[in-house]
Every structure is written in structure tokens, then in C-alpha cells.
Amino acid sequence: MSPRSISDLALHDAPVVRVDDTVEDAVKQLVESQLPAVPVVDQSGVYRGIFGEREFMKARFPGYLNHLHGTAFLSRSLDDSLEKRDACRHEPVGNFMSTEHIDVGPDFADTQVAELFLHHQVLVIPVVADGQVKGVIMRQDFFRAIAERFLAGGTAA
Amino acid sequence: MTAAILIFVVALALIASERVDRTKVALLGMTAVVLTQVSDQEHAIEAIDFNTIGLLVGMMLMIRMTETTGVYTWLAIRAAQWSRGRPLAVVLALAVTTVVLSAFLDNVTTILLIVPITFLLADALDVNPVPLIMIEIFASNVGGTATLIGDPPNILIAGHTGLSFGEFITNLGPIAVLTSIVVIGGLYFVFRNQLHITEESRERVMDLDASRSIEDATEARRTVPILLITILLFFFHKALGLEPATVALAGASVMLLVTNQDLHKTIAGIEWPTLFFLIGLFVMVGALEETGALGEVANGIASVTGGDRVAELLGIIWTAAIGSAVVDNIPFTAAMIPVVDSLGGGTDNAYWWSLALGACFGGNATIVAAAANVAAVGMAARAGHPIGFVQFLKYGIPVTLVSLVMATAYVMVRYA
């Protein structure tokens, strides 16, 4: 029997949120699940995107932040006066999710997962089969699984 | 000739509709021109104005390398702090910075630099950012009119005619400055009630630490002087016997040599879509010219005006303005250039200044009239302040009319 792949070891069940759920609900899910991002599905359960720490920050902080070249000139005293977009609380999460599909199919290789983590700097990769989310792989777990195997001197799967 | 006209008109309509990206439209149009053998490949390549392309590439590279140092953010923040949060001074600081930057950088870059900072300042000062953004859009289009490198229509005209940087600034600079004053002053008056800034929030601009916006001071010291020297050289390019493209590319090459920035990232910072858009456009316009279509337009105009100079000057300004407002001032100017060329117009080049004024000022009328408007409105929407097409028109049309009337008066007084 071949040893389980690292990605299998790192596969994590994940709650999903629906595109029409509010940002507030999605953030609750994020906090409760302790995942850095959760997959977003449409009404029929098909995977549409991902909503996580980055997307939440984009929704919550001023929309022009992305366009500034740097923000080192900001001081703490200004934090209160900069527009915090609280209105996003009741908006559908679909408006803020990332639709850049960085995911893997059911039959993925560890190398593919490693390549995605390296190239896209994401923290979570959803595993999707026929449009349905089967779980997520967290970078942290993936790293721990490789590190444990590496330190144990075992061979890679 | 019919095929060339058909291709160009369909392309213009598609660009104006904004359903398809203008670069894709231009490349398809160019392909259609060559595939249908309206123009053969050799002529198509000859039609591309490499002086324009070279000038743009050089400027884009230098702007890219200087903007990563944070020097423009520093400039905008210093200007805002100079205003000390007083409403009129805030408007002046932002508008004058925009006018000056857009005269020497391209308008889209100016807008991309100034608009995000403006949102931040508006937040800190607790005012609606939209009036400030609108003023900046208009200031960038008017300011860009002043120089050869300030606005794409001017670059196109210079590429075709060989008119010098000095000739542009001495002929267009005065009216650009005058129009800026009137437009900025007028808009401040219109928006003044929306620009109440409390004493408390005025203090907040002083909390910004401009010096920390310089991300790499050594890099700034290496690159910014080269940009300044290049701009200085533009003033003397004719005396030195150098084309603007040569000056810009020389500056860019030296800057590439001294910079520590990654070459691939810098070159990737060139706005390739704009360059490919222009290439496609040059080929389509070249076909129109080659088949004699634009000559007929010129003959048509000449027969209406009877060769009357005043009528032709007026015709050029207002046609260019209306065409630019409806379509996009770049393709419209590209098509107008051969027409104006065949009209002649004498040694004072008044026809070219009229074309530049019409096309640049016409860029203020609608969102689609100039690329800078599209960029600013897009950023505003992403920042949660959508500016509607009609809302823009409410200010764009009056601004355009006032500036065109001023431009017309200027041309009449100085050249007619």
C-alpha cells in the first residue's frame, strides 16, 4: 500500500458560504472555522470563488488602498478618520470574493499543490470535483506534513 | 477606399460602444486592412509612426522607474500639506500638481498617481472626494495640452509634423495655463459648498509624514535627475537636431543603466495595450490616407469653407472637440492629422494648434473622451464613489464649452 500523499494528510473539511450570504456571516464562518479562507458556492452548491482574510481586508479598509504605491506616510492618529467600510457588513459576500480560481481537482499531485502555494501566495486551496467543494488544503497543514516527513527522514509519497 | 472607410467606421463605433477593448478593436481593424489587401503589409508597416511609439516607450519607462520610488506621492502629500486643509488651497494644491504633472507625464499616469492620494486626503479631511476628482480629471486634460509630451493627441501631431517641444509650449502653454485658471476657479466656485472642512480635520493632513512616502531615496536620487534632465533636453531638442523619441529613449536607456530596479519588471511596466492600440490605429488611418479617403474629406471641408482661414480654424477646433468627445481623442486625432495636413494652413501652424486644442479640450466632455477620465472614474467606482455618465456630463459639457470658447478666442486673436 502506497503511503498517503502529503496533500491527503493536509486535506481539511471546510464549511462553505453562499454567494448571497452577507459578509458578516462569512466572517463569522472564517472566525469559527479558524480557516484563513472559505470557499464560496452558488445557490446550487457549485464552487464560485473564495473569501478569506485578504478579501475581508479589501472589503473593510478603504477601496483606494490597493491603488496607493505605499502607505508608510500614514500615521496611527489617522486610523480613526479613514473611511472604514462598515456598509460591507450587509452586502453579499459574492461582491468581494476572489474569483481567481486557484484550486485543484480530486486527483491532484503534491507537487501541483506545492506549485500553487509557491506561485499564488494563497493560504488555502480548495479541492473541487464536478464543481463541488470536497475540502480545502491549508498551507500551514501542507507545510507541517512535509516538514514532519522530512524530519522523520521518510521518503516522499 | 470603401473598405478602408468601412473598417475605420466600424472600429470607431466599437471603440465608442466600449463593448470591446479598444486595443483589440485596433488590432482587428489593422488585420482586416491587411487581409483585405486595402493596404499591403509593406505600406501597413510604413504607416506606423515610430517617432510616436518611441517617445511613448521612453516616457513610460522613465515614469515607471521614477514612480516606484514614491516621489510623486511625496509631491502630492507636500502639496496637500501646503494647503493646511483650507478648502480653496486644497483644490489649488491638488489641481496645480495635476496640471504640472500632466504637462510632463501622461495624463493616465498622473491620474493613477493623484486620485488614490486624493481619496485618502478627502477621507482625512472628511469631505466628498468626487468634486476633487472631477477637478483633477479636467485639470489633467487641460494641463496635458500645454506640452508636446503632455497628451496623446499632441504626441501624434508632433510625430506627424515634427513641430518641436518649444513650439508646442510657446503656442499651447499660454492658453492651457489660462484655461486651467478659469476651469479650476470655476469648478471651485461650483463645488465650494461641498468643500467645508472643519478645523479639527484640517489638522489631520499635517499628521501625514511625506518623507516616509519616499520608498527608496537612493533610487530616487539616481532616477529623478535623469527625468528632469530629459525634460530639460526636450526644450532644446530641435536646436540639438534630435527627435523627441530620441531624447526620451536616451533618457530611458541611461535611467535603465543606473537603476537598481528589475529590468523585467520595468519593461513589463510599459503600457503595451496603448502601444498596440496605436499601431493598429496607424495602420487603419494609413489605409484611409493611402486610398484617398482622407483627401476627399479635406476637399469636402475646403469646398465648404472655400479655403477661408477663419472658417477652417473654427472647423478644426470644433470638429476635433466633438469627435473626441464622442469617440476617444486618440483615434479621432489620428484620422484628422492627414486631413489637416492637406488643408495646408500656412507657416504659423495655427491649424495644428487648433487640432491639438480641440482634441485635448474635447477630452473633458464625456467619460469616454479621454483615457484619463476612464481611469479616474474606474478608480472612483472601486473606492465606493461611482461617477455616472450623466453626472460626469453635467460638469464635462460646461467645462468643455468654456475651454473651447477660450481656445477659439485665443486662436482667433493670435492666428486669424
Image: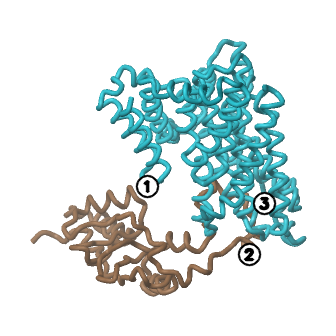
| Spatial CA span between label 1 and label 2 | 41 Å
Of pointers 1 and 3, the one earlier in the residue sequence: 1
- Residue with the mark numbered 1: B19
Q: In this rendered view, identify the residue nearer to me: B333 or B221.
A: B333
Instruction: Using the image, tell me which numbered label, if any, was put on residue A68.
Output: none
Q: Residue at x 83, y 40 (%)?
A: B178
Distance of mark 1 from mark 3, alpha carbons? 41 Å
Residue found at the far left of this picture: A1
- Relative placement, left or right, of B338 versus A117 is right
Image hue for chain B: cyan
Label 2 element class: loop
Residue closest to the eye, B398 or B113:
B398
Front position in the image: A107 or B134: B134
How many residues crowd around disc 1 within 10 Å: few (fewer than 14), some, or many (20 or more)?
A: few
Q: Position of residue B49 (x, y in %)?
A: 51, 25
Q: Is residue B413 visible?
A: yes
Chain A palette colour: brown
Chain for disc number 3: B
Question: So how many labels did they put on this image?
Answer: 3
Q: Which mark is residue A80?
A: 2
Q: Amino acid at mark 3?
A: Leu
In this rendering, the answer to whether B275 lies above or below B376 is: above
Q: The disc labelled 2 sits on which kind of residue? A: Asp
Q: Position of residue B224 (x, y in %)?
A: 70, 35
Asked whether, in this view, residue B290 is left or right of residue B396, the answer is left
Label 3 near label 1: C-beta < 8 Å? no
Amino acid bearing label 1: Arg
Residue A133: horizontal and vertical position, in percent?
28, 77
| Percent x, y of residue A116 | 34, 60
